[in-house]
Amino acid sequence: MTVRTCLPWPDKRLRTKAEVVSEITDDIRAIWDDMVDTMEAMPGVGLAAPQIGVMLQLAVVDGSTERGRAVRLANPEILHSSIEMREHDEASPNLPGVSAKVKRPRAVTVKFLNEQGMIDRRDFVGIEATSVQHQIDHLNGRMYFDRLSKVKRDMLLRKAKKLA
């Protein structure tokens, strides 16, 4: 298991839709293991494969306080979102030093392939719901700041540029 380097913004892969995973293999499981190590090293509550340059629809999410409970997802798809919204400070290791408050549904039901290659369905609430939605955005070539107004997005990117 390895901690991988996160791509620096504006690497074009961060704007590219990831490829569907056709089956869960030992190679896929090894990528997930590296992603968990990378997420823990940040530390963060989630990571999508494109963030480390792997252009596959893979994500890991762990919002537990004790850690070590990462959910590994392939081809995640939101089936249902709650009407109730939740605002949370979001950031990305691809654009270090900046963050922004983003509103997303408080809870989501997600369908995905699990570690055994079976279709699974899970409800995520609170920080894990925010994280899984954030990771799905990454898999679709979107960044959290795309959800901000143009003025806020421009300010955030200018600040990140100064810090770089």
Image (tube, rainbow, N blue to C red):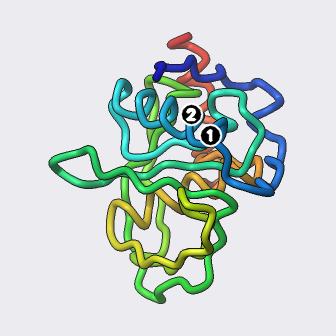
Residue shown at 41% from the left, 29% from the top: 37
Query: Contact (CB < 8 A) between labels 2 and 1?
Result: yes
Task: Give the camera-side residue of 164 and 70.
Answer: 70
Q: Of 101 and 1, which appears nearest the observer?
A: 1
Residue 62 position (above or below residue 50): below
Q: Position of residue 76 (x, y in %)?
A: 63, 65
Q: Which residue is tagged 1? A: 26
Badge 2 marks a residue whose secondary structure is helix
Residue at position x 57%, y 42% in the image: 29
> Residue, x 51% and y 42% (percent of image)?
47
Q: How many marks?
A: 2
Amino acid type, mark 2 = Ala
Residue at (57%, 86%) from the top-left corner? 80
Which quadrant does the C terminus fall into?
Answer: top right
SS under mark 1: helix
> Which residue reaches farthest left?
66
Q: CA distance from mark 2 to mark 1?
A: 6 Å
Percent position of residue 30, x then y: 56, 34
- Residue 98 coordinates in the image, percent (x, y): 46, 30
Instruction: Give the vertical position of 22 relative to 25 (above or below).
Output: below
Give amino acid for label 1: Asp
Instruction: Give the camera-side residue of 66 and 9.
Output: 66
Residue under circle 2? Answer: 30
Q: Nearer the viewer, mark 2 or mark 1?
A: 1
